[in-house]
Amino acid sequence: MEKLRIVFMGTPEFAVGILDTIVKNNFEVVGVITAADKPAGRGQKIKYSAVKEYALENNLRLLQPANLKEETFLEELKSLNANLQVVVAFRMLPKAVWEMPEFGTFNLHASLLPNYRGAAPINWAIINGEEKTGVTTFFIDDKIDTGATILSKEVAISSEENAGNLHDTLMNLGSEAVLETLHVIENGNANPKVQIDAADIKTAYKLNKENCKIDWTKSGKEIHNLIRGLSPYPAAWTYFADKDQEWNVKIYEARFIGEIHSETIGRITTTKKEMKIATKDGYIEIVQLQFPGKKNLKTFELLNGIAFSEEAKAF
């Protein structure tokens, strides 16, 4: 059994929980690679990645290359003398990086591969109404999320779960999966299996303004799944119109009520505390939303300060 010397690569909060598990289980982390600092917010202050914050707090060797193919970075990476690299929520690696260590480079992906390869697996599993998802570790090759799998762990998705809740569940499950993968590699028992593609594989496309917009002609369940799958970030959105006013509104939480009715699709009806929007097979009851320039509010809070006419509609 050879002692592992690990370089960890990751950037967002999701990666921090995994790195913390590796450190707390006394594996040797010889280096951490994360995204370069970026100015953020209105003041354009330099913002550190979540992984950088953790590395600094725990006195871990930190590298922030602007270019992963740069010769000076590759030399510095080689000098760390790692025999394994672990990647969680990082960018695509050049071959010179992923093939460097003796035991290769493995990635943790937040789906049951081969399904939901791509940028937003947690979101799309909910958007598509899946009842289960999970995490997979796999050895990186020269394509995106296609390498031979080491192990996977499965979890159920509840009917009201949103992307934020599922993110946290998968971060904990991912920690377990990475830990098991490290032990398997350390003991020389890794038995990677080639991913088998099928015609019905689902993809986790990058999220953008278009695929986050609510289409009110879809079924209530599909709309509800979109809202859950994009909450709390980046959030599903729609236009509200009432008389001569129009707003771009984010919807964070909703419920679907199945019901036969004759109302126009998209019509907004409100009471003093409730708001619902007609779909072809019922209503979407809005629980939490955000108007432009306003705070994220519960519906009853919003309705304290705004009234809608019978002409109000979502589109």
Image (cartoon, helix red, strand yellow):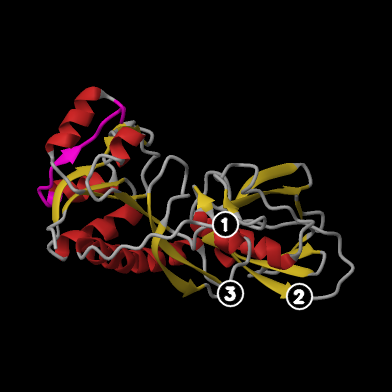
Location of residue 89 in the rendering, given as x and y in whole percent from the top left corner: 37, 49
Going from the N terminus, do you reach mark 2 or mark 3 first? Answer: 3
Q: Amino acid at mark 3?
A: Ser
| Dot 3: element | loop
Separation (CA) of disc 2 from disc 3: 15 Å
Look at 32% across and 45% down and name the residue there: 11
Q: Which mark is residue 124?
A: 1
In the drawing, does residue 149 fall left or right of residue 214?
Answer: left
Separation (CA) of disc 1 from disc 2: 23 Å
Q: Amino acid at mark 2?
A: Gly
Q: Which residue position holds label 3?
A: 159
Q: Which residues are magenta?
A: 57-69
Q: Which residue position holds label 2?
A: 258
Going from the N terminus, do you reach mark 1 or mark 3 first? Answer: 1
Look at 33% across and 52% down and name the residue there: 106
Q: Amino acid at mark 1?
A: Trp
Quarter-of-image position of residue 199: bottom right
Residue furthest out toward the right: 262
Give the quarter of the figure containing the N terminus.
Answer: bottom left
- Picture layout, residue 176 above or below residue 212: below
In the drawing, does residue 149 fall left or right of residue 231?
Answer: left
Cβ–Cβ under 8 Å for marks 1 and 2:
no
Front one among 36 and 141: 141
Dot 3: within a 10 Å radius of its alpha carbon, few (fewer than 14), some, or many (20 or more) residues?
A: few
Separation (CA) of disc 1 from disc 3: 14 Å
Q: In the image, which is nearer the foreground, mark 1 or mark 3?
A: 1
